[in-house]
Amino acid sequence: MTDDVARDALPVPDYDHLPVGSLGHRIRSLEADELDVLRRYEEQHGNRLPVLQVLDQRLRELADGAEPSTGDPAGYAPEQAAPPQGGSSASPATTGPPQNPPSHGDPTNPAQPRG
């Protein structure tokens, strides 16, 4: 039987809202016991296989001698790219050539067969 893990006891703030792709980077500074807490929480709440695989891989790395990295799992790390700076480069000078409508549906098109 596993101990119930409270959300506010997690070593990674806002854990429930992290994308799986960011999780590997955010757990690099955690010790094995902190990873165990996250793993138990995940099993009890989401039980998402990709998340469990990331946690298990990091636990294996630590067991094989890897050291936790420096850094703060609570540190600012934008989860999405910032919007591009500046305006659009589209203008009348950058538009493509005019296009003719398809031959079907235009009765004035000479290429369209007449009945």
Image (cartoon, rainbow, N blue to C red):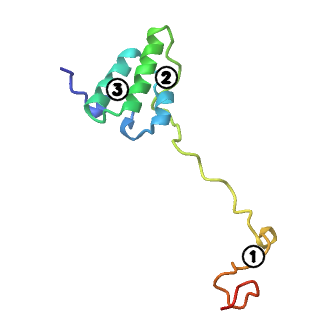
Q: Position of residue 21 (x, y in %)?
A: 49, 35
Q: Quadrant of the C terminus?
A: bottom right
Numbered label attached to residue 99: 1
Tell which residue pokes out farthest to the left in this image.
1
Q: Left of 29 or right of it: where is 94? A: right
Q: Position of residue 113 (x, y in %)?
A: 70, 86
Q: Which mark is residue 38?
A: 3
Q: Residue at x 67, y 54 (%)?
A: 85
Does 110 sit left or right of 10 as displayed?
Answer: right
Given residues 113 and 75, the one toward you in this image is 113
Mark 2 Cα within 10 Å, few/some/many (few <14, many 20+)? some
* 3 or 1: tag closer to the N-terminus: 3
Tell me the CA gap for discs 1 and 2: 54 Å
Q: Amino acid at mark 3?
A: Leu
Q: Is label 3 in a helix, a strand or a loop?
A: helix
Residue at coordinates 49% horizontally, 8% vertically from top-left?
65
Residue type, mark 2 in image: Arg
Q: Is residue 8 in sight in this rendering?
A: yes
Compared with 39, 109 (above or below) is below
* Left or right of residue 51, residue 105 in this image: right
Q: Mark 3 or mark 1, which is nearer to you?
A: 1
Q: In front: 47, or 103?
A: 103
Q: Which mark is residue 28?
A: 2
Three-letter amino acid code of the residue under disc 1: Gln
Say which quarter of the image contains residue 1: top left
- How far separated are the C-alphas under marks 3 and 1? 57 Å
